[in-house]
Amino acid sequence: MEIIGNAVIQKDGTLLLPQEIIRRLELKFGDELFFVAKGGEITISKLPDAMKRTVDYYLAIGCDRLAAEYYAGGRKRLTGVKANPDYTLILTYEEREERIYDCKPLLDKGGVFVHLRKYENFARVFIEYGAVCWDIDPNIDSNEVWNNRIDLCPDSCYIDSTPACAKGLTRDDMLSAKDAMLAMGIDIQDEEAVAGFAVSRKVLGLDRRKK
């Protein structure tokens, strides 16, 4: 185990570890870590296989079905992002998996996201440290002025997005379809199959919002 002396918690709740620690533990993206705090010191190690989390574990701590299956299956690395005029993002994850993330609910909330209501600002999206990011003022270095940066957790973006093949469906549509499939005894992990089922439910007027 290694002692961490200068880890930094980011605004999105993620923990930034020194590169030296990452190298010494031979960490790679998606590794789960185990922390112990004692006597003012924090020790860290890779999570033993015996402690790997299951879908049932994540359901038990309050995750819904889609989130539980995502975390239990292992986090995915974000590799690309592109802004669309309808204020959605095309997100590309490892193995060229494309997903659509609708940012309009964020823009409606206001706060820091009001800066993205102008499409010219929204279109300046990029990836840094694996997260979806915007600089409010592109002429300011956000590494020096932290509140110039807007960022979104790549895990949340994955969970709250839909497969590119499911354009027009919401996350609630997908979750409702998944719940219905499970109730019928059909446990399908392939999201494209779930999306097809969700489309059928919408056509039949059986989606969650119409109940």
Image (cartoon, helix red, strand yellow):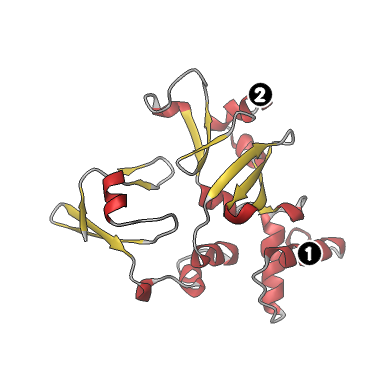
Location of residue 209 by image quarter? bottom right
Between 33 and 184, the one nearer to me in the picture: 33
Q: Specify the label residue 13 is tagged with.
A: none
Residue at (15, 52) in percent of width and height: 40
Location of residue 9 by image quarter? top left
Location of residue 187 by image quarter? bottom right
Q: Which x, y percent locates residue 151? A: 50, 37
In the image, is 164 to the left or to the right of 154? right
Q: For the C terminus, give its image quadrant.
A: bottom right
In the image, is 84 to the left or to the right of 20? right
Between 27 and 83, the one nearer to me in the picture: 27
Residue beneath disc 1: 196
Q: For the N terminus, give its image quadrant.
A: bottom left
Q: Earlier in the sequence, mark 2 or mark 1?
A: 2
Q: Which residue is outermost to the right?
A: 204
Give the answer, above or below, for where 206 lies relative to 145: below
In the image, is 190 to the left or to the right of 14? right
Between 2 and 34, the one nearer to me in the picture: 2
Q: Which residue is outermost to the left?
A: 39
Element under disc 2: helix
